[in-house]
Amino acid sequence: MQVNIPDTGQKRIVVVGGGFAGLTLVNKLLKSDFQIVLLDKNNYHQFQPLFYQVATAGLEPSSIVYPLRKMYQRNKNVIIRVTELTAVHPDANLISTPIGDIRYDYLVLATGVDTNYFGNAQLAANVIPMKSVSEALYLRNTLFSDLETALTSNHQEQQSLIDIAVVGGGPTGVEVAGALAEMRKHVIPKDYPELDSRQIDIHLIQGAPRLLDGMSEEASTAALRFLEEMGVNVRLGVLVKDFDGKTLSMSDGSQLSAKKVIWAAGIAGQPILGMPAEAYGPGKRLKVNEFNQVEGLSNVYAVGDNALRTDGAYPKGHPQVAQVAMQMASNLAENLKRAAQSKPPKPFAYKDLGSMATIGRNKAVADLPFLKFNGVLAWYAWLLVHIVQLIGFKNKVFVFFNWVWSYLTYDQSLRLVIKPRKLAE
């Protein structure tokens, strides 16, 4: 059964994924003569760089998401379906979804990546990932529910409820650890005066020998200094081997007691049924050529975190960051328009615009192509970049005023435990 999508006679581009790559591609093709079918399992775009602020009660979830249908309500050539990709049939130019099959002339896979547990089922069952706004909200609920429970627990149980371990020293891990340290200092003493906030241990565990491994040595050193000044226990060069829900086991034989382990240690692609096995490279990413065509397929493309393009400058593939995703999508959009005009495609060339990470109030690091700096100026630059990248004027305003309020009052006003309720049958 095919999905009820009108046949307009236009070439049809099916885009799977409404993240940075998928939306950039759609936006660049809005004025072209294509029918664009955008598929996503959610009916909204999620601004992933600020998940950690939802998790630590700095922002409300609605301020970092934007409805896809509202975004394209005036674009008649864009058709949206909320569903998931279950299989690809390249020989028939079809994809399968739970709502039926969809025909394509061009297929663009912008599905992103998921949390990588490195094959450890026990880790997957017990740690807390943060790859979606719903997972960030779950972490927020867990943080404050455990604080409430700790008030009526004995000392040993209380300690396991209030201690937190963050695994992974990339931007996400560093930002989460910093936000938790600020919460421990400014929020918990006021909301939970019966708890001694000084007893809350925040651990950041990184397998690599330094933090922010993809950034400069200067950024790494500054991030470590900032975190240690904030009282975060940073352990470098140590891998997490297992977690049973109570005890974290490390590669050096040491153990750590904590009920909450936030997993920011790795990402991996998700294989798609019907795609040739030889199309996948390390990390289960789809191997693409310089035009983002998936290896072995002529009209199937991959852009964003799930695309693996290797060259002399990036022998292990491009960084899995938003800038790469958007630049890939922009180049592909231009090539699809050129194909419609029987023009040759242009190869993708990544222009590194720099990278940033924030650790806390007035504490951030920035690596720009022409300058490396940290501290207050880097923090202001980080704020500006993320405000600009948010989708929707209302979201920009809400986030800006939340940040101003938090800065002036040393307070976060969204410490709510909102749990889903099952309706009675």
Image: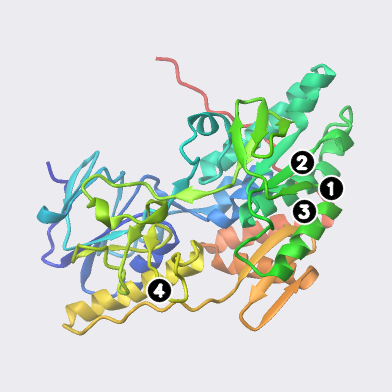
Identify the residue at horizontal 59%, vertical 74% (top origin): 354
**Amino acid at circle 1:** Gly
Counting residues from the start of the chain, the first of labels 2 and 3 encountered is 2
Q: CB of mark 1 within 8 Å of CB of mark 3?
A: no
Q: Are marks 2 and 1 in contact (CB under 8 Å)?
A: yes
Q: Rounded to the nearest whole Å, what is the CA distance between mark 3 and mark 4?
A: 44 Å
- On the image, the x and y values in percent for residue 92 come to 10, 53
Identified at 16% across, 55% down, the residue is 90
The residue type indicated by label 4 comes to Asp
Q: In front: 424, or 221? A: 221
For disc 1, the marked residue is: 231
Determine contact: label 3, label 4, CB under 8 Å.
Answer: no
Q: Which residue is mark 4?
A: 311
Give the crowd class for mark 4: few <14, some 14-19, many >=20 residues within 10 Å.
few
Question: Which residue is the site of mark 3?
Answer: 406
Distance between mark 1 and mark 3 Cα atoms: 20 Å
Foreground residue, 417 or 175? 175
Element on which disc 3 rests: helix
| Front position among marks 4 and 2 | 4
Of circles 1 and 3, which is in front?
A: 1
In percent of width and height, residue 59 lies at 65, 49
Q: Which residue is mark 2?
A: 202
